[in-house]
Image (tube, grey):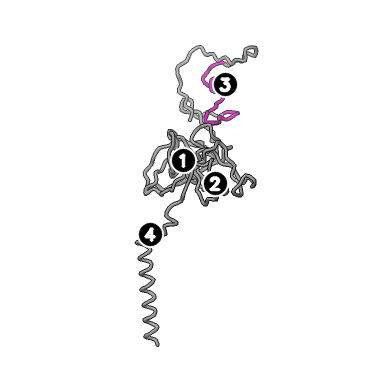
Amino acid sequence: MLMGAKINKIYTLVVLTAAIFTFILMGPLPGHAAAETGVVSGSVVNIRSGAGTQFDISGTLYKDTRVEILAKTGEWYKVQYGKINGWLHQSLLSNTTTATPPLATKKIQVIDGPINVRSGPATTYAIVTKIADKAIFSVLDEKDGWYRISLPDGKTGYVADFLVKEVNSSVVVANDKTTSPSVSSSPRVILNGTQMTFEVPPIIENGRTLVPLRAIFEAMGATVSWNGSQYQSICARVSFTGPGIYPQ
C-alpha cells in the first residue's frame, strides 16, 4: 500500500512537471497572444451601451484614440479605452490590427515640467492632465511629433516630443507624478541672482508664462505709468546697465 502511494505521487509529480515544461516551451495559448486594436476616426464619437444607436451613450472618445477591440456583432465593435467600455459602429473605427507587444519599450522623461498631456496629437486637443518635472513614462507609439504615453490611471495621453527626452529603457518608470489640469507650478523670477517676490505670483497658463512686469521694471529702477486714454503702460529709465533677469 505504501509503495503504491509513493509510486502514484511520483507519477503525478512527473506529469505536472512535464505539463509545466511543455507550457513554457509553447508559450501562452493562441487566443491570448495579442489584442486586436483600432483607431477612432470620428472627431468626437459616442460609445454606446449596446450594438445600436438606440442604446444609451456610455462615454465619448476623441479622434486618433487607439482602443482595444473586445468583440464584434454585425457592424458594431465592442471596444475598451481605460474605464470606457461600450459599442462603436465600424464606420467610426479604422486601422484595425492585431497589436503585438514590443520587445523593448521606449521611455521618455519630462525636460522641464509640469507639461500638458492632451487627448490627441496636437495642441487643439483637450488637456487631460499635467505631468511633473523629470517624470518618466513608457511610450506606446509616436505620431506627428507627439508621443502617446501610458498614465497611472490606465488611460493614455499625448505629449509633444520637444518637451521630453528619451532615456535608457532600463530606467524605472516613475509615472505617478501627475497633477490636476487646474494645478500650475508657479515659475520663479531671478533678478541679479536674487529671487523676486510679488503680490500676484507668476503663473503658467495654457503653456505661456505670465509675470507681473510692473514689479520687475520698478525693481530695475524704471518708472512705470499708465496712459488711460490710449490703454498703454509706459516704462522709462534714463540709464540701463543690463542686470540679468531669468524666469525659471
Q: Which mark is residue 113?
A: none
Disc 4 from disc 3: Cα separation: 67 Å
- State the separation of the CA atoms marked 1 and 4: 29 Å
Instruction: Report if residue 111 is visible in the image.
Output: no
Which amino acid type is shown beneath numbered disc 4? Gly
- 159 shown above or below 175: above
Kindly identify the residue that appears in the image at 52 percent across and 52 percent down. Answer: 71
Of labels 2 and 3, the one closer to you: 2
Q: Earlier in the sequence, mark 1 or mark 4?
A: 4
Magenta-drawn segment = 198-223
Residue topped by disc 1: 148
Whichever of callouts 2 and 3 sits on the residue coming sooner in the sequence is 2
* Residue 99 at x, y percent in the picture: 43, 48
Name the mark on residue 75.
2
Outermost residue, bottom side: 1
Is 43 positioned to the left or the right of 149 in the image?
Answer: right
Q: In terms of secondary structure, where does tag 4 sit?
A: loop
Q: CA distance from mark 2 to mark 1?
A: 28 Å
Which residue is labeled 4 in the image? 27
Image position, residue 169 (x, y; %): 37, 46
Which one is earlier in the sequence, the residue at label 2 or at label 1? Answer: 2
Q: Is residue 9 above or below residue 127?
A: below
Amino acid type assigned to the residue bearing label 2 in the image: Glu
> Mark 2 Cα within 10 Å, few/some/many (few <14, many 20+)?
few
Q: In the structure shown, which secondary structural element does the residue marked by tag 2 occupy?
A: loop
Q: CA distance from mark 2 to mark 4?
A: 33 Å
Provide residue 16's location: percent of width, then percent of height.
Answer: 39, 71
Q: Earlier in the sequence, mark 2 or mark 4?
A: 4
* SS state under label 3: helix
**CB under 8 Å between callouts 2 and 1?**
no
| Between discs 4 and 3, the one toward the N terminus | 4
